[in-house]
Image: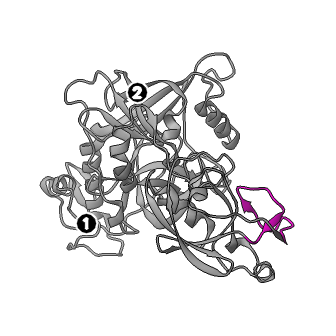
Amino acid sequence: MKRSLSILALTGTLAVGGLVGYELNTRTAPVTASATTQAVTSQTAPDTNLSAGSGAQGQMVQAANGTYDGGRARTESEANTVQVVKDRQAGLVYVSVRESSANSAQAQLRQRLQQQLPFTLPDDGSGSGQAQTGTGSGFFVTGSGDIITNNHVVEGASEITIRLHGDKTEYKAKVVARAPDFDLALIRAEGLPSGAARPIPLGDSDNLDVGLKAVAMGAPFGLEFSVSEGIISSLERRVPVGTRGVEQSVIQTDAAINPGNSGGPLLDSAGQVIGVNTQILTGGSGQSAGVGFAIPVNTVKKLLPQLQAGKGGVIQTPTLGVQFTDLSVLSAAQRKQAGLPAQGALIQEVAPDSPAAAAGLRGGTTAGLQLNGQAETQGSGADTLNTDGDIITAVDGQTISEGDDLRRAIIGKRIGDRVKLTVQRAGKTRTVDVTLSAFSFPTSNQ
């Protein structure tokens, strides 16, 4: 039997379950089919939960005043959700992978999941010498069969097959390109009948508000075609994403997301993709806490041209080639003792032949502060801190308040881009231009 896959990059445990919400904004006016359909197909129509109507807002309305459709009581919000699902279900894809090795990324992820889950997953041949399989989700982005999913769903797979909603036929798929640092991948289905690929329109994740509807579609725990609904809970979350675990902005939702939802779409009330479901967080109780995360769709839109031109490769992100200490994690007493500012990235080491070395950045040479385990030098396990290295305080004019600000700024660039670093050296501030490359520095944070 197959196991469904997900990823957890935050503390906590994966678990089954979800939260059941309730609707406070019930309409008394009937919902017509044309009005509901327009909310989905126009792509710019407002969320019917937020539009003006004759019903009370923020108050419970008696069920007797509800909307009826063919004998089934429905609120306007319910009718909208039903229409969104009907219009977009053909764009959902079930992804199955076969692992070539017990040491593959999928197999290792499966082992971590088994350790985190408070119950035993169905046996799929793990440890029996049989080929291991996993499932995830995805969605069409083009009519030619291009599918977006999570990188952790397909990485290490020796064989990928997909199925469409309502169709048991399996189609082979191949990886077009992967973006591991963003946990995204583009796969392409082969041999699809004409018109079978139904792309789901991509929305704008920069134009969202907390409280808007969020509909998650996918195959949690291998349960094909499951839908959960919630709201956008926060747009201010940053969590570790991708293979390097760089903290990136994500959409938080209380729509139930579980293993197997990975790579599936998070939709708005207009039926547009606003995110790619990727992670969940629980409080360690073994049950869903209603905290799920989705990669913003604008990240997908930014990377899509590179993914489509990938030819089976990996989209690399640039690096500086430095080890540094986040000054914000030092105590005020430590910073005062060493004469360091309150924030910035204090360079400990610059790798030879790296972009940072080519730009003339300098690492520290004098151990001026004993850490005693109180602060961590990022990219180094040193117990002492070299305090005379360059301090990066801004990237392209954006202040470095914490170490991850620097990591996010660099990972968001492309190879060949030039960045302006504001650097303090020996008490003086200077600007350094750096041309970024895909330099490999195994122990570096950048």
Q: Name the residue: 67% across, 80% down.
A: 342
The amino acid type found where label 1 is placed reads Asn
Depth check: 437 or 286 in front?
437
Q: Is residue 206 left or right of residue 250?
A: left
Counting labels gives 2
- Residue 170 point in image, percent of width and height: 37, 21
Can residue 266 be seen here? Answer: no
Can residue 213 be seen here? Answer: yes
Q: Is residue 413 left or right of residue 203?
A: right
Q: Which of the two discs, 2 and 1, sits closer to the camera?
A: 2
Q: CA distance from mark 2 to mark 1?
A: 52 Å
Element type at mark 2 = strand
Quadrant of the image occupied by residue 194:
top left
Q: Name the residue: 69% across, 72% down.
A: 327
- Residue 210 point in image, percent of width and height: 40, 69
- Residue 165 point in image, percent of width and height: 32, 32
- Residue 54 point in image, percent of width and height: 20, 74
Color style of the picture = one colour
Depth check: 33 or 403 in front?
403
Residue 174 is marked as 2
Q: Which residue is mark 1?
A: 65
In the picture, the quarter occupied by the C terminus is bottom right
Q: Look at the image and give the residue range highlighted in magenta.
A: 369-388
Magenta residue check for 353:
no
Q: Name the residue: 56% across, 55% down.
A: 355
Magenta residue check for 372:
yes
